Amino acid sequence: MKVFNKVLLSLLLIQSFTCISQEKDFFSYYALINQADLQNAKGNYQKADFLYQKAFAFCGNKGFANDYFNAAKNAILLDINCLYYLKQGFKNGLLYKIVKQDTIYRYLKNKGNTKHLKKEYKKIRSEYLLTLNIAIRDTISQMVKEDQKYRKGKYERMSLDKQRVFLKQVDAKNYKKLLQICKAYGFPGRSLVGDDGYEIGFVDVPLLLRHLDSTELNIFKPYIVQAIKKGDFHPEHFAFAYDYVTMFKTTVDDLDKDGNHILIIQQQYGMIQRSEKGKMFLFPVESVVKANKLRAEIGLPTLQDYALIIKCDLPKEGFYKRVFKSDATK
């Protein structure tokens, strides 16, 4: 109990000195979180905890759900009470089922905290949902369902060409709806539709962005950058979507001089990984210096720090190239 009170006291002290108006941008918050994640990756858990506290105080405890979750996981490595972080995460959209699916749940269960925490979560969740625009949230949810319906094998008996036609129709429809929402309400960030802690398939706005083309994504960019600045949309989501949309320098129809299908990939932000022989690698970037400049503009850590945080090698500069023999694609 003394340790828990000490954590609360330090939070209040930091908040009294650093809490700012939410009208100011979130870039200082992102910088603190980036440093906290880096210290956690280096095993400096005490320093990481201090930085998490400082970040949350800076934004008046309106941090991102996943950041509170990471702070809670860092706290158990110090064997201090992580409940404060989890409850603040719940207040900012973190789902209980995400906690339950993680190893942190076993720690909570051993401490006898799960039953009471679940009861508190239900109350907090009800109050949280009242702050959101449920109509827009439901619209986004339906858009995601339509998006996934055409990508999960429902129409696998169709020819590839027909599937592409259907996908283009669905994506075009979702693009128009998303643009209408942006023009009427601003970008549908966490203050409008919630932040479910990287939940997949419900109000997954980042997924919808990944299925735009580069021209469409750039149309949304001013709305997204404004949302990032206000702390309404995490910069990782935009950077990942941008890399996903623009990284393929060839299409499935492109052939080399020998008639083989050729895949050429290059990222701008350096967010997407690949697996090779059981090890994870980031796809190449055009330039590490250029990537770091782009990352800094939206509040992301340098590629050097990001590689340490996700425990991955620094991406190479250049292209990732893979050739598929023409007979293997028939």
Image (cartoon, rainbow, N blue to C red):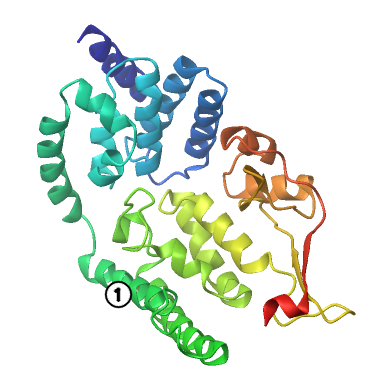
Which residue appears at 39% of the width and 51% of the height?
198
Q: Which residue is mark 1?
A: 142
Task: Judge from the rendering whether residue 330 lies leftward or rightward of residue 63; answer left or right.
Answer: right
| Residue 304 as seen in the image, left or right of residue 25 | right
Q: Is residue 204 above or below residue 288?
A: below
* Number of marks present in the image shown: 1
Mark 1 lies on a secondary structure that is helix
Q: Residue at x 54, y 86 (%)?
A: 164
Residue 193 horizontal/vertical position (percent) = 30, 61
The picture places residue 44, in percent across and down from the top left corner, at 52, 17
Q: Residue at x 31, y 16 (%)?
A: 80
The answer to whether any part of residue 251 appears in the image is no
Residue at the limit of the structure toward the right, as seen here: 257
Q: Position of residue 296 (x, y in %)?
A: 64, 44
The amino acid pointed to by label 1 is Gln
Quadrant location of residue 17? top left
Above or below, comparing residue 160 to residue 179 in the picture: below
Question: Relative to 291, does residue 37 appear above or below in the rendering?
Answer: above
For image coordinates 49% across by 58% down, the residue present is 226
259 or 178: nearer the eye? 259
Q: Nearer the viewer, residue 179 or 81?
A: 81
In the rendered view, does 290 fall on the left or right side of 238? Answer: right
Instruction: Residue 246 in the image: state x and y as whole percent.
Output: 66, 67
Crowdedness near tag 1: few (<14), some (14–19) or many (≥20) residues, C-alpha within 10 Å: some
